[in-house]
Image: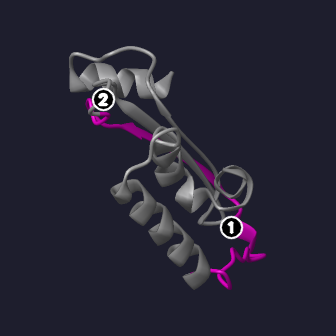
Amino acid sequence: MYLATYTRLDIAFVCSILLRFLGNPSQAHQKACLRVFQYLQGTIFLSIIYSKKAGDTILHGYCDSDFGADIATRRSVSGIVFFLASRVVSTSLKRQPIISLLTTEAEYYSYT
């Protein structure tokens, strides 16, 4: 979880799902965990490089949500991502605290 939170934001979502089944993992969960390690091994030499262009230091933020994607609780998942110089600098992904009845409601809660 340390890698997903502080150094490798690209595996945060799959790690959060795998952690739900940490107490009683099945073969499918173990295969998914092995796949994450294979992905990490294959991308170990990739990094983010920022340029020093004058107009390239604009901060952009986006948010989105899905409608009831968490099958176990039927809650929507919200995601926020911030880009600086066209590179990801911060992300957040979490289940919404309430169950949304409409897609518009799920989108509204992703903004708050």
Q: Quadrant of residue 28?
A: bottom left
Return the residue at label 2. Answer: 72
Mark closest to the chain's N terminus, 2 or 1: 1
Q: Amino acid at mark 1?
A: Gly
**How far apart are the two marked residues, 2 and 1, measured between alpha carbons?**
45 Å
Return the residue at label 1. Answer: 55
Using the image, determine if residue 14 lies above or below residue 57.
above
- Label 2: element kind: loop
Q: Residues within 10 Å of mark 2 (few under 14, many from 20)?
A: few
Let me know if residue 24 is in the magenta part.
no
Front of the two marks 2 and 1: 2
Residue extending furthest toward the right: 52
Let me know if residue 52 is in the magenta part.
yes
Q: 11 or 83: which is nearer to us?
A: 11
Q: Amino acid at mark 2?
A: Ala
Residue 21: percent from the left, percent from the top? 46, 41
Magenta-colored span: 43-70
The answer to whether residue 6 is left or right of residue 76 is right
